Amino acid sequence: MAGPGGTVIHMCEPAPAARPADPSVSARVEPAVAAESAVAAGPAPVGGVVVRPARWADGEALAAIDRRVWSPVHSPAPAPSEGPARPFFDEQGPPAQYLVVEVDGPVAGYIRLCPPTPLASNAHVRQILGLAVDDAARGRGAARALLRAACAQARAEGATRITLRVLGHNDAARKLYASEGFAVEGVLPGEFLLAGVYVDDVLMGRGL
């Protein structure tokens, strides 16, 4: 699952008609993940927002963000342990699968992008498997910048579709995704029992 600022969603953890963004205010993105030139109907990220490929050294900061922003509104996974954190990156989820966003310098969030399966028949699809943005970076367009960079990265890898999953009660995330061209493509009713309430698992996707 994935969600905007102050959210974290991991579904595989075991995690549009649009107008061009104003280039004078769009997020700066490192060349390896150059942002899309025209995707969003929503506001462009403001200055000081930079998306770049993740590095092994980012792991500690990203694990801390996960612990700070976890909520059953955003994630069906258990709350992170207060004890020593497991390494954020591992062989199944190396830095190559992640983009990170910096807001005025510090790392403020990430998005994870992977092929949904190892099948050649599915190689044209990428799936967002996790997205988190620190509370301190909310309102700066960091989540939107990550989404746009992920779409651009997927397109650069030859993908023609990108998908994600989001909890049905996460209205803010669903609104963000819709504004970036994602449409609901399926619903698994009552898929998760969170805080005593059955919550839908909503499948969304868009073409690239």
Image (cartoon, rainbow, N blue to C red):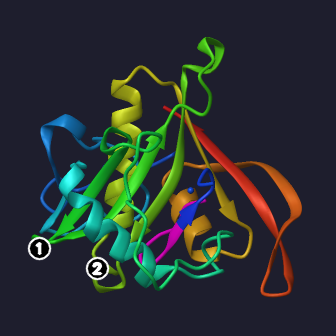
Q: Residues within 10 Å of mark 2 (few under 14, many from 20)?
A: many
Label located before the other in sequence (2 or 1): 1
- Amino acid marked by disc 1: Asp
Disc 2/disc 1 C-alpha distance (Å)? 9 Å
Q: Residue at (46%, 61%) from the top-left corner?
A: 131
Judge whether residue 51 can be spotted in this image. Answer: no
Which residue is under mark 1? 104
- Indicate the secondary structure of the residue bearing disc 2: helix
Which disc, if any, is residue 64? none
Q: Residue at (32%, 66%) from the top-left corner?
A: 62
Majority secondary structure of magenta residues: loop
Which residue is under mark 2? 137
Residue extending furthest top? 120
Q: Nearer the viewer, residue 29 or 113?
A: 113
Q: Residue at (28%, 79%) from the top-left corner?
A: 137
Q: Are marks 2 and 1 in contact (CB under 8 Å)?
A: no
Q: Residue at (63%, 17%) from the top-left corner?
A: 119
- The relative height of residue 203 versus residue 160 in the rendered view (above or below) is below
Number of numbered discs on residues: 2
Task: Give the residues in magenta.
Answer: 1-8
